[in-house]
């Protein structure tokens, strides 16, 4: 449940950013972000909120693990 | 990675006795299995799971209360999906839903807020579970509700905080661990300072660790280095993401809306100051202050050792029900429900490998 997923910001309007995770788009809130976010940045997303900026390489590294854990969770939900 | 494994071997040889470490976070428990970390480690290192699975530690009474809320006329209860199958005294939320309660799964409390906006004649209650990773998002949602003037949005907060639970574990004296692998994402929010007491008051080396195989092995190596040289500090392995100060803005918003209260953890009992309730000026969002609910004390299922598993005293396979009466399809205790629960992780990875 504490998993945060790195995602790329593709659009920003006020405090709402649109992110791209595995090709799916979602709107998330930037309310909790300590620093300015720009289009193209990677952010860690948890429960609909960005909680931290991360480097692109970090995002790529962690995505594969997170995908696995998510699959495990989904199996459990289905 | 081989270099790190070699270093770990050298360190454990120089320490000259077995070492027990606790991975606090359920995501680590799963990652350790996924990466086969135990097979890479020398036998002198024992990894124990801790209380860091929010689903597992939600008390029976809190689940029963959520069910009772869902039965109130005009209420839509919203929850994260992984809470649905957690057993209460008699039932789970998913069984309550089958019996007619309006319960919806959301990915974000903001989705619950949207539901409130569309259903102004209903009370939308968000079952607010989770640690410090999650509670700022719930605070942010209440802030948003205020801004948009959506006054039919409420929460039932059973949020918990990690550091008081670790303190309680150490105070109980039952837990014999020499170091802590601290959670990565909780620490993204709170940073390292709230864990300072682990090193300063209890002399326990602690390292905030990331989630891939290299991260976890490096975290373990850093802990062994501390133990070998007689140091006790709170260090960060996961520097790519976690900063010493955490995310000050998220912490400020969390503290603006929530204050500590005593909370009951499944299997661990009441831990002082380990829960979060809404502050006085936001109480109108707290469903407990809007409707009166009396829900009797919950009883842990007999023979379920979930509590001892969460304390790192037992491993799941020590439980007599493990894999027999208790499986992920028919969980007896909460540790078998969540994919991040130790029992479920052991069932999935250990049982198969044997
Ligand atoms: S195996 Fe089931 S009954 Fe045993 S401790 Fe784990 S959750 Fe409880």
Image (cartoon, coloured by chain):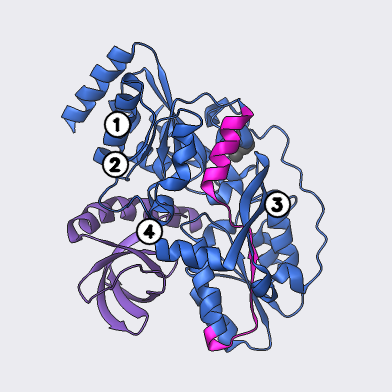
Element on which disc 4 rests: loop
Circle 4/circle 1 CB separation < 8 Å: no
Chain ID, mark 1: B
Element on which disc 3 rests: loop
**Residue B144 seen in render:** yes
Which circle marks residue B222 in the picture?
A: 1
Q: Is residue A13 above or below residue B55?
A: below
Element on which disc 1 rests: helix
Q: Categorize mark 1 by other alpha carbons within 10 Å: few (<14), some (14-19), many (20+).
A: many
Element on which disc 2 rests: loop
| Residue holding disc 3 | B88
- Name which of mark 3 and mark 1 comes first in the sequence: 3
Circle 2/circle 1 CB separation < 8 Å: yes
Which circle marks residue A4 in the picture?
A: 4
Residue numbers of the magenta segment: B147-172
Q: Is residue B161 magenta?
A: yes
The Cα atoms of the two marked residues, 2 and 1, are separated by 8 Å
Percent x, y for residue B106? Answer: 51, 70
B235 sits to left or right of B262? left
| Residue holding disc 2 | B237
Chain ID, mark 3: B
Q: Is residue B113 magenta?
A: no
The Cα atoms of the two marked residues, 3 and 4, are separated by 27 Å
Tell which of B25 and B149 is nearer to you.
B149
Q: Categorize mark 2 by other alpha carbons within 10 Å: few (<14), some (14-19), many (20+).
A: many
Q: Nearer the viewer, mark 3 or mark 1?
A: 1
Q: Colour of chain A?
A: purple
Percent x, y for residue B56? Answer: 58, 46
């Amino acid at each position: 449940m504490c998993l945060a997923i790195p995602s790329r910001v593709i659009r920003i309007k006020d405090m709402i950013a649109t992110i791209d995770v595995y090709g799916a788009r979602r709107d998330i809130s930037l309310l909790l972000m300590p620093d300015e976010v720009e289009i193209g940045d990677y952010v860690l997303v948890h429960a609909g909120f960005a909680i931290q900026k991360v480097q692109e390489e970090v995002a790529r590294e962690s995505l594969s693990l997170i995908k696995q854990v998510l699959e495990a969770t989904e199996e459990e939900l289905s | 990675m081989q270099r790190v494994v070699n270093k770990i071997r050298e360190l454990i040889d120089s320490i000259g006795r077995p070492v027990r470490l606790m991975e606090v976070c359920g995501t680590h428990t799963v990652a350790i299995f996924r990466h086969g970390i135990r097979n890479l480690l020398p036998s002198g290192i024992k990894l124990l799971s801790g209380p860091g699975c929010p689903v597992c530690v939600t008390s029976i009474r809190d689940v029963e209360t959520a069910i009772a809320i869902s039965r109130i006329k005009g209420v839509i209860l919203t929850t994260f999906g992984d809470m649905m199958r957690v057993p209460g005294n008699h039932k789970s939320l998913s069984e309550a839903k089958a019996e007619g309660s309006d319960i919806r799964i959301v990915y974000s409390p903001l989705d619950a807020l949207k539901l409130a906006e569309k259903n102004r004649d209903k009370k939308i209650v968000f079952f607010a579970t989770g640690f410090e990773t999650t509670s700022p998002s719930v605070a942010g949602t209440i802030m948003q509700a205020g801004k948009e003037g959506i006054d039919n949005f409420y929460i039932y907060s059973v949020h918990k905080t990690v550091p008081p639970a670790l303190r309680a574990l150490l105070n109980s004296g039952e837990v014999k661990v020499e170091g802590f692998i601290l959670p990565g994402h909780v620490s993204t929010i709170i940073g390292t300072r709230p864990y300072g007491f682990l090193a300063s008051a209890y002399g326990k080396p602690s390292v905030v660790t990331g989630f891939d195989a290299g991260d976890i092995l490096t975290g373990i190596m850093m802990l062994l280095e501390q133990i070998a040289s007689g140091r006790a500090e709170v260090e960060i392995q996961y520097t790519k993401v976690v900063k010493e100060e955490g995310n000050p803005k998220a912490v400020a918003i969390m503290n603006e809306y929530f204050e500590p209260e005593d909370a009951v953890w499944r299997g661990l009992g009441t831990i002082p100051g380990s829960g979060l309730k809404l502050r006085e000026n936001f109480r109108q969002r707290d469903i407990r202050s809007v409707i009166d609910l009396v829900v009797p004390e919950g009883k842990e299922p007999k023979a379920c050792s979930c509590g001892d598993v969460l304390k790192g005293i037992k491993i799941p396979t020590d439980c007599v029900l493990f894999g027999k009466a208790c499986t992920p399809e028919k969980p007896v205790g909460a540790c078998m429900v969540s994919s991040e629960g130790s029992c479920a992780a052991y069932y999935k990875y250990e049982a198969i490998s044997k």
